[in-house]
Image: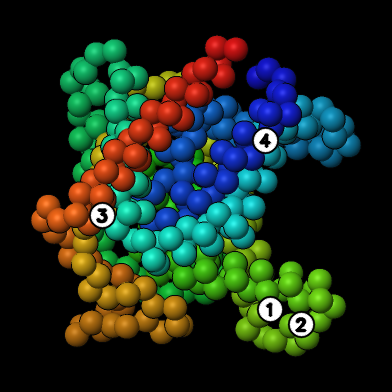
């Protein structure tokens, strides 16, 4: 089991959860990268995979303290608390920054992913043929996902549950963006914008003593969608964690190679210099192309000219790289003390 933590450590865990939550909401960025580079990825996976049959027996026997200690409850609850707070604070700030400073925000993310590639790559003592082969497999899968066409929005609760399972992949698998997968599934706006806003509005209504939302069928529908999505996310989190924990134990180098490939493959999604051809639609019925296929978001990527604005963006790429090195350095420092 992991060592006891101070109040400062607890606060840092909440902050790390904030960072994971914010990263998970951005298409192309993986919250798992934050966990990996900050040095708590393996503990995160370990804690999630402890939600198993033994944990259930402890819970049913009302041995709550034993259950809490067995699943590393202090750690996992603080991380999840940070992610929940993020959806109502940091992620909204991030939405604002992307809207008004899009180039600079994407430049920082691009730099962070470049820094993450170095951080993951240096875990290999030797670049064997197996490492190279599985890295290439990861790159191919990552790039293939990046160029898939998005589907139509679907609010059927069974499909929403499936989306929840898939969406948490970004937390358990660095480089695999859960929010980008939701765009491809057609449910990004429904699950990460509309339903979250519905919950936010409902909480405000409750504090104001206004319960008229109970007669609003659209609000109730959104809340049902959010509940099912959350249950699916928790299910996926536990399921994926068991799989990743097994793979890290049995095939660590191969698993890390594929993760590295995913991260490299995601660079195209977060390339800062892109011209928006179609904006993300927030209505129920998205724009369709000439063949009747829905258009969620489409970009034309290009090589930038060396203007003052682009030079500043390049500087922000280095800021992103530096932030990853700073997080990694601080994580090692904390482990040494």
Q: Residue at x 70, y 23 (%)?
A: 5
Viewer-side residue, 191 vs 13: 13
Location of residue 19 in the rendering, given as x and y in whole percent from the top left corner: 52, 44
Alpha-carbon distance for marks 2 and 4? 36 Å
Q: Residue at x 23, y 46 (%)?
A: 314
Dot 1 falls on a residue whose secondary structure is helix
In the figure, 200 relative to 164: above or below?
Answer: below
Report the residue marked by disc 2.
214
Q: From the viewer's perspective, is the residue at label 3 or at label 2 nearer? A: 3
For marks 3 and 1 on the same chain, the one whose residue lies earlier in the sequence: 1
Horizontal placement of 289 versus 229: left or right?
Answer: left
Horizontal placement of 263 versus 199: left or right?
Answer: left
Location of residue 67 in the rendering, given as x and y in whole percent from the top left corner: 79, 32
Q: Is residue 55 visible?
A: yes
Viewer-side residue, 140 vs 281: 281
For marks 3 and 2 on the same chain, the one whose residue lies earlier in the sequence: 2
Q: Would you identify the image quadrant in which residue 221 lies?
A: bottom right
For marks 2 and 4 on the same chain, the one whose residue lies earlier in the sequence: 4
């Amino acid at each position: 089991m992991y060592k006891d933590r101070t109040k400062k450590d607890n606060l840092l865990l909440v902050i790390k959860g904030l960072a994971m939550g914010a990263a998970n909401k951005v298409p192309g960025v993986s919250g798992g990268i934050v966990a990996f580079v900050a040095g708590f990825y393996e503990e995160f996976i370990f804690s999630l995979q402890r939600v198993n049959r033994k944990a259930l027996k402890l819970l049913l026997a009302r041995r709550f303290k034993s259950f809490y200690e067995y699943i590393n409850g202090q750690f996992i609850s603080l991380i999840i608390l940070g992610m929940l707070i993020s959806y109502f604070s940091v992620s909204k700030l991030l939405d604002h920054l992307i809207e008004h400073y899009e180039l600079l925000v994407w430049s920082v993310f691009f730099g962070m992913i470049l820094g993450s590639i170095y951080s993951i790559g240096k875990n290999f003592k030797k670049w064997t043929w197996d490492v190279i082969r599985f890295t290439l497999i990861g790159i191919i899968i990552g790039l293939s996902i990046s160029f898939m066409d998005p589907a139509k929005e679907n609010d059927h609760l069974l499909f929403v549950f499936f989306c929840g399972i898939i969406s948490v992949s970004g937390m358990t698998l660095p480089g695999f963006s859960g929010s980008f997968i939701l765009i491809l599934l057609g449910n990004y706006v429904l699950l990460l914008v509309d339903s979250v806003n519905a919950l936010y509005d409902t909480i405000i209504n409750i504090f104001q003593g206004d319960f008229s939302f109970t007669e609003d069928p659209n609000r109730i529908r959104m809340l049902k969608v959010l509940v099912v999505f959350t249950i699916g996310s928790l299910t996926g989190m536990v399921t994926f964690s068991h799989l990743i924990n097994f793979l890290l134990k049995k095939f660590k180098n191969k698993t890390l190679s594929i993760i590295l490939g995913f991260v490299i493959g995601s660079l195209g999604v977060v390339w800062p210099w892109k011209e928006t051809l179609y904006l993300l639609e927030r209505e129920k019925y998205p724009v369709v192309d000439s063949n009747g296929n829905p258009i969620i978001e489409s970009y034309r990527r290009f090589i930038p000219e060396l203007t003052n604005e682009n030079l500043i963006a390049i500087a922000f790429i280095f800021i992103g790289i530096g932030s990853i090195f700073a997080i990694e350095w601080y994580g090692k420092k904390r482990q040494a003390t």
